[in-house]
Amino acid sequence: MFTGLLTHFGRYLGMMGQVFSRPEKTRMYWNETLRQMVDIGIGSVVIVALISVFMGAVTAVQFSYQLGGQLIPRYYIGYIVRDITIIEMAPTITCLVLAGKVGSNMAAEIGGMRQKEHIDAMEIMGVNTAAYLIMPKLIAALVVIPLLVFMAAFIGIMGGYAASVPTGLLSAEEYIRGLRSFFDPYNVTMMMVKAVTFSFLLTTISCYQGYYVKGGSIELGKASTQAVVLSDIFILLSDYLIAVLLTG
Amino acid sequence: MIRAEHIIKSFGDVTVLKGIDFVFEQGKNNLVIGKSGAGKTVLLKILVGLLQPTNGHVWFDDLDLCTLGKKELRQLRMRIGMLFQGSALFDSMTVEENIRFPLDMFTSKTRKEKDMRVDYCLERVDLVGSNRKYPSEVSGGMQKRVGIARSIVLEPDYLFCDEPNSGLDPKTSIVIDELISDITKEQNITTVINTHDMNSVLEIGDNILLLNLGNIAWSGSKDEVLDADNEYLQDFIFASPFLKKIKERMN
């Protein structure tokens, strides 16, 4: 098993080496990057917005319940929703969901191309397939996913407002006072570090799974599932490591 | 000219190719034939550099494929065209975009020059008017022709065709065979065709290599096939009862 892990890791590094080699034609890569940005960005806005609203709403309701009857000012709910959303919920939950949506799609797309000999066809033409197929996806993800995470944080905080103010859990003034209290811009930096790291992981792991797929449709399905599972595991692992490193 | 020099290929304990020495000549249709599992596809993949041989060398004129660095290999590959069994056309691109892809990727031609080249290739494979169609909107035979157009768009020196007639009706097969053969002669390129189609063997086989269990069972030209004193070749070529009857009548 250990040898297997080492083999995968070595192959992953080899693939990444090819991904970062010089493009044959920058314009072709640029066009593909724009297409990927649209695919990842526009295609994920609705799902990210939806989960963000509920993420903020649930956080507000849960903390309101937890803090009820204690000697903690109610405006703290706004403060907690803001920080939890920025530090943890927006980057982690968004990227876990995107690993399922975007990651599995990348694995299936590249895996399908492998099975239909599209990758072989490009190789024979002389195209650096790892670079042409993965680099645009990676650049697009590194640009678009942090923006989605930023949007998720904003919508999440708004979700917290929508779930707590109209329902009478706390007043609008209290919620906004909470949002404006104890703000540390470093938390936003932490959110962006997480967003960029998670985007890199979910993209490269998913592409790796698709790029080296062998066999037929069952194996392609397995690779797609594996892409999501491994991306999620590595996102959570790196979440912990980033938390330790950046807060230590 | 492509020269295979003592090619051995093993996968674990199984040796698929057991020392192939062969010259694929320029300006000729070089056909590789053999039963399923004889090692044809493995040989073709080694010739185009998708697989590394366990032992031996592949020479493209004076270039040894097996010792080339990545950069040189890419440069050589730009001189290679390949038609895949399933055509391997990019689904998300139109017929025209598929043919244009190598030009966009590797040349610095102007848009007009690229248009002219694409138009020429479309005309050459008799597909004028299909520019805007997607691969899923054209027939299997047309997909093969698009594949041929894409493989010749960079004016390659070497053309590889993996079972170009598979899944096609006999008439379309003849059209595809003639097209490949004409392009080979016109452009004086080295063409290697992996096929099961006996009609192709007897029609366009300038140089034929018959593989059996990883060895060369016979080699020669289409004119030598009928008279060859090789039982395995005769059994293979005239495997179908229909062809057997024809041969008996000819005799």
Image (tube, coloured by chain):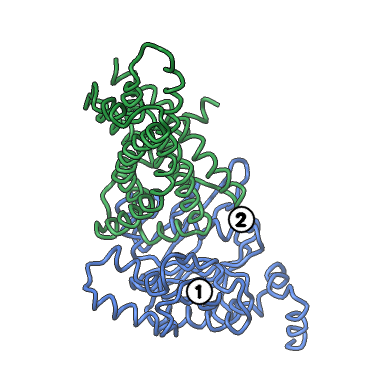
From what the image shows, is residue A223 above or below residue A238?
A: below
Depth order, front residue of B192/B113? B113
From what the image shows, is residue A241 above or below residue A196?
A: above
Q: Quadrant of residue B1?
A: bottom left
**Quadrant containing the N terminus of chain A in the rendered view:** top right
For mark 1, what is the residue?
Answer: B143
Spot the blue chain and give its letter. Answer: B
Crowdedness near tag 1: few (<14), some (14–19) or many (≥20) residues, C-alpha within 10 Å? many
Q: Quadrant of residue A193?
A: top left
Asked if disc 1 and disc 2 are in contact, CB closer than 8 Å, the reply is no
Depth order, front residue of A125/B195? A125
- Name the colour assigned to chain A in the rendering: green
Tell me: B15 left or right of B181: right
Depth order, front residue of B194/A81? A81
Question: Disc 2: which chain?
Answer: B
From what the image shows, is residue A219 above or below residue A9?
A: below
The disc labelled 2 sits on which kind of residue?
Gly
User: Do marks 1 and 2 share a subunit?
Assistant: yes
Tag in front: 1 or 2:
1
Question: Disc 1: which chain?
Answer: B
- Seen as rendered, the residue at the extreme top is A71
Q: Secondary structure at mark 1?
A: helix
Q: Secondary structure at mark 2?
A: loop
* Residue for point 49% across, 49% down: B53
The reply to whether residue A186 is visible in this rendering is yes
The disc labelled 1 sits on which kind of residue?
Gln
- Seen as rendered, the residue at the extreme bottom is B249
For mark 2, what is the residue?
Answer: B214
* Residue for point 38% across, 62% down: A125
